[in-house]
Image (tube, grey):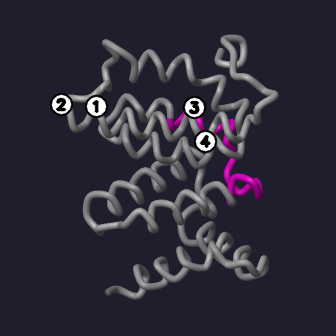
Amino acid sequence: MPAAASAFNQVLGLVWSRHLPIKDAAVDAFYRMFLQGRSTAASTRVLLEMYEAGCKGSGWTYTHLASVEELIKECTEKELIKPKEAIPELVAALRSGACSMALRTLTALGAASVADLAAQLGGMVEILGPGGPRVGRDGAEQLERCLLLCKLLQRLLGAAGPKAPLDEAAMG
């Protein structure tokens, strides 16, 4: 295994540490390895490519996916990623071949920025809803996107809390 891949796998495990300095070091290492010095557009491309490589080529497990999601969420909460800029980039990526990867990344960002993601839901429905251009080519792709969209909505509602319903006004 190349050194970079090994280092990345170590960072993934450290994000779950109960010791805050270790967790913070993992988030900072992830940021330095993949996002530092990049524009929002370039950073979102890197995240999409990371998910693509992990899901399609590197054999990531659900633990890998959860760890990357946690790292992205932590970077957003530490304001290392700007969701107000990144979320529209990722919604635009829903129209591309990176649709499923964009949904995964939006799920991670959305937990840290409920209002910004909720404002994009109307556009997401146009893209992913019935008759939308990225609803899926076949049953398997449709089910995957439905699963990812449900996970995104579940995360969004959990982050919004029970007293903050996401009505049409909140969804843009």
Q: Quadrant of residue 153?
A: top right
Crowding at dot 4, Cα within 10 Å, few <14 / some 14-19 / many 20+, comes out as: some
Amino acid on which the number 4 mark rests in the picture: Arg
Assess whether mark 1 and mark 2 are in contact (beta carbons under 8 angstroms): yes
Name the secondary structure under disc 2: loop
Which label's residue is closer to the chain start, 4 or 1?
1
Q: Give the Cα distance between marks 4 and 1.
A: 20 Å
Residue hosting label 1:
142
Amino acid on which the number 3 mark rests in the picture: Pro
Q: Give the Cα distance between marks 4 and 3.
A: 18 Å
Q: Give the Cα distance between marks 2 and 4.
A: 26 Å
The residue at the point 34 percent across, 14 percent down is 130
Assess whether mark 3 and mark 1 are in contact (beta carbons under 8 angstroms): no
Q: Nearer the viewer, mark 4 or mark 3?
A: 4
Which label's residue is closer to the chain start, 2 or 4?
2
Residue hosting label 2:
138
What's the mark number on residue 88?
Answer: 3
User: Residue 129: x, y in percent?
Assistant: 39, 18
Crowding at dot 2, Cα within 10 Å, few <14 / some 14-19 / many 20+, comes out as: few
Magenta-colored span: 75-90
User: Residue 91: x, y in percent?
Assistant: 50, 31
Q: Give the Cα distance between marks 2 and 3.
A: 26 Å
Residue hosting label 4:
155
From this view, report whether residue 64 is shown above or below residue 130.
Answer: below
Amino acid on which the number 1 mark rests in the picture: Gln
Assess whether mark 4 and mark 2 are in contact (beta carbons under 8 angstroms): no
Amino acid on which the number 2 mark rests in the picture: Asp
Task: Please tell me whether residue 76 belongs to the stretch shown in magenta.
Answer: yes
